[in-house]
Amino acid sequence: MIHKRKKSTITILNYHISQLIIEKKVHVIFLFILNMIISGVLPLLMVILPKLIIDAVSLKDYDYLVQVMIVFAVLITFLSTISNFIFTYLRAQGLAGRMNQTKLFNKKLKSIPFSFLESAQFQSEKKAAQATLTMGSSGFEGTFDDVSRILPKIISIIGFSIILGLFNVYIIPITIVVCFIQYRISLRGSKYALARNDELQEEKRKADYFIEVSTDFSYGKDIRVEQIEGQIINRLSKQNKRVMKVFKEISFFKYRMNLFDIVFIISINGLIYYLVVVAYFSNQITVGTVAMTIWTILAITLDLQFVFKNLAKLQEDTNYTDKFLQFLDKDFSNETWGSKQINTSDISIEFKDVYFKYPNSEEYVLKGLNFKIKAKGVMALVGINGAGKTTIVKLLCGFYQPLKGNILINGVDMKEYDIFSYREKLAIVFQDVNIYAASVLENITGPNPSDKDIDRAKTSLEKVGLLDKVLSYPNGFQQSLLKVIDETGTDLSGGEAQRLSIARAIYKQNTNIIILDEPTASLDAASEREIYNNFYQLIDDRTSIVISHRLASTRFCDSILFLENGKAIESGTHEQLMNIEHGKYREMFVTQGKYYQEENNDEL
Amino acid sequence: MMSYRQKALKLYKLTFSLSKSFYIFAILRALAQTAKAFVGVYGLKLIIDSLLKADYNQALISVGIVISLEIICHMLFLTFDISLINRTEYLIRRVKEHLSKKLMNTEFKYLEDPKYLDIADKSIFAIENFGALDNYLNATIELFSNFLIVLTLLSILIYFNPLILIIITIAVLFNRIILKRSSKKQIKKFDELGPINRKYTYYSRAVSDIKYAKEFAFYPLSDLIYENSITYLEETSKFMTKFYLIIAKYQSYATIVNSLQVALLYLAIGYLSISQGFGISSYVFVTTSAIKVSSSVNLFINGFVRIRENTQLLAPIIEVDSFEDAITRSNEGILAEPLHSLEFKNVSFSYPSNDTIILDDVSFTITQGEKVSIVGLNGAGKTTLVKLICRFYTPTKGQILWNGVDINNYQFESYINQIAAVFQDFKLFALTLFENVDMSQIDEKKVNECFDKVGLKEKINRLPNGINTYLSKQYYVDGTELSGGELQKVAIARAMYKKSSLNILDEPTSALDPLSEAEVYDNFAKLVEGTTTLYISHRMSSSVFCDRIIVLNNKKIEAIDSHKNLIKNHQGKYYELFNYQKEYYVE
């Protein structure tokens, strides 16, 4: 077990080296070695120097004293300055390396299917993987630090051992054995820490949630009106206590392991002192050598402790990186997709006895759903909250796959298509609209739009009635949105944001399916009407699915599907459904139209 | 701008007030470390002295004493060290807790001001991403320890010869100059880092934010965010490299001074030994002390540099700490009674950050038991009206009167308890359904009633843990994710649960299906009998059953009247908007 862990530290160090090679930074490896030699020799000089001075003092030779001093002053100044620069350079490289790994991490995140993002297990795996990237003094960057500190000590220790060996040869193996035992003991401490790390991280994550809520200002209104800041702080401090409980248990375990240092002090220091005293009284050594030996043993004790403790830390740090690498290597595609491409602009969609429930959930959201939309047909999905409308959209997006039954696209199971080329054919306006801190233009086109793209973006803004508004901004299309990045950025109102997201869907080229999920929920009556008036232009001869609680929109659809409890219970045109006595759709339409109708009657 | 000294002082005051025991243990650890250093230096003298006396037994006794002292000191050190490690973690958590508390209690206007948003972000970023607080506290610990060591050993050295002290003092003075220059440069550089850092944080968070994932799958936005995250990542990285090199440059100057200092110390002690002829044991003692002092002085200065470095990073924490606590937090003011009337008296308003007028001379009165609807286009100022009523902002001109008294004269808690509000962008928490409606979990029966009224009863009964189910799968494996409409119902239930005399519903049903919408309006009407309700909705149908309608147009009130009367005015905005929606429902 220990052997395996040790191997994994080396594997991670190899990874570090391979990354340096990939980043074309081989010189960093040489700097590590140079640093090892220079910073390793310095402490040796500091022990040899006093010995030479004692010689000079006992000879009462001023000239010799001055000579020794000058040589040492120059040597020490020169070497420490170089060592200092190399050390800092390596520190900066550690940071740069961490940043580069963050890039890999971001890239990986970009490729992870949606179905994972919603699961708690994935979130904690992600957090564990990310840990190595968010810490400056430990994790990936910490590894650079550890190595650049440990390597020089190895040289120093070898040098000190030689000095001690001159006095007594047996001291070297004894020292090494005792230190190794001490290392194994402190390793137990860090293994324990590692074993409980998941638990600690989980408790921390829960505490972080409350910090997130209280520092995320969008919660500000509710927190103030509900008067719950005290409650949130209570929960935070309770959770912090839980974190501290685990944290303390881990640190006390390490403490118990550290107490074995006492054995170390007694055996090594005691032995040396004893041997020195015995040797002195048998006239084998002078007082000068006594001093040097004791200095050396003090220095080597500190160095050995340092090295072994840092080796344990190195293991901890590389273990963080190990989790990160596991994450990078993990295959996050549980859904399998084929490689078929869609070659026609006429796309029909059919749900055939589709069953679906979310992972980690017992309850089926779709229970044998059947419906069909012909190519270029316009269908409205209607039903009460929780009937499964949004789930249908998620399935059609390919975020999840049905558990039973099939979704047929042009008669072929959706699973057989290449999901990415399929998504190219699909334009969608989601219920929850997001605006990004970038220019208006980039919010529609993505990065680096060409002149042609800009023209198309203009057209789509015009279609949603946002062009005049955009042109009125000080920077027009280049106006930044949100104030996070650019203090002069514009915050769009809910209605404007919704229109911008519709513009995105219009902008997307060569799409043959369009899905509109509550596209007018936050629009005022006038803007809503404008969107409806341009409805056919908006869907532009594509196979269309419209979800809206404003049943007025069903008027534009050539078929309506009424969902209840994950099943289609009514379907047909508006007129057909309105003619069903006690029909669900009819009931809903009448309920919503009631007040308008009553008014109508009044006027009549 | 606060000076560095002020910032450092405030930071110490803050941390001290949050955990005194941290400082107690920092001092205890420093004492143990000093004792350890002293035993290390003095023990050698003790042994050599006993050797020189040529008494074998006494030499062994000396060795025994030295070893015992070493063990005692080391044990004390380990014990205090571990206590301090625990207290450091605790203090960091306490500081975060303090920030959380502060930000929740601060004046609302800060929350919508990008400048403060930035400060709040930075304060958390410094702790999370730079480990600034951790570094800062550790540097403080080092500072204590080395200060004590220097103090103890220096007093011994002075006793031997002042020359040694002079050499050390000169070196310290040089180091101080270098340090000052270095930190000036660092501060300047660090200010440049701010904007880059902010961008980096935003994009790197956005890359992994689930709420963006759906859009990323379909639009080139993911490329936009990803590319930007890489750009700013590289910029941050380049910047930090430069930053480190500046530090390295000045550290090298310090290294040169220190190396010269060590050489001079040896030379001076060597010279003194020869000329004054103090014994070999004293020689050893003085040199080890001097070298220890020199290295401790270095660590001491290094501690200062690190504290300075991290104080700059942590400055936003102090700024957050200096945000005004909202007047709304004070207990002053009279207690609010249930609503009889709410009056807007010539209220004008523009947000503090710019001069754009949002509301212009708005006056109206709502009396107890009324149902009033506010109607207007997007951006007409409807939501601002709500914010003013909730005392998030104060009108620029005019007054809002609750029962005839300016709302600012009421004690906030008693006032806000009279108001239940469902905001357009309401938020729920990753807690249980029960807790979301009633955080203190007092009245389960009433919570269930409210869930029943909003039509969630069945749904909740089907959940494995009923109302004790967590509203999050991200934090709890057995939690649940509700749909947008269901979440809205929970928010409405929360408002229903509150014993208030004024209900404000801002777009309360935008995500609800028509049946739930009708149900919610119906139940709310029943529930709130006698209480007063203010509706804001784009669904014009909802204003039909209201007693009066306030029509906002172009920052002003265009009309206040009943539906019946408003609809007669065919030139009015209300008629126009109502008919837009009506036409779809008329056969």
Image (tube, coloured by chain):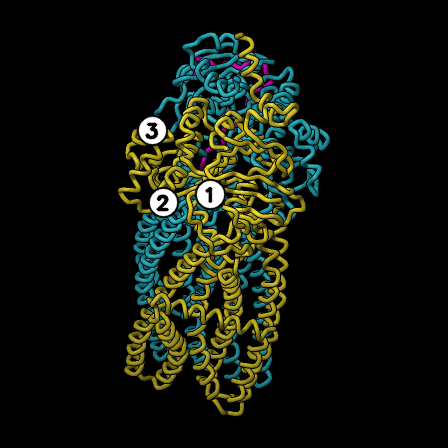
The first of marks 1 and 3 along the sequence is: 1
Chain given the colour cyan: B
Is residue A263 left or right of A23 when viewed as pictured? right
Q: Position of residue B140 (x, y in %)?
A: 47, 55
Q: Position of residue A68 (x, y in %)?
A: 31, 80
Badge 3: chain ID: A
Element under label 1?
loop
Question: Colour in which chain A is shown?
Answer: yellow
- Residue A294 in magenta stretch: no
Q: Of the residues shown, which amino acid type is indicated by label 2?
A: Gly
Residue where numbered disc 1 is placed: A347
Q: Of the residues shown, which amino acid type is indicated by label 3?
A: Lys
Quadrant where the image shows the N terminus of chain A: bottom right
Quarter-wise, where is residue B502 in the image? top right
**Between B12 and B461, the one nearer to me in the picture:** B461
Residue drawn at 57 percent across, 67 percent down: B73
Residue where numbered disc 2 is placed: A446
Query: What numbered label is drawn on residue A216?
Result: none
Quarter-wise, where is residue B158 in the image? bottom left
Residue where numbered disc 3 is placed: A469
Judge if badges 2 and 3 mark residues of a common chain.
Answer: yes
Badge 1: chain ID: A
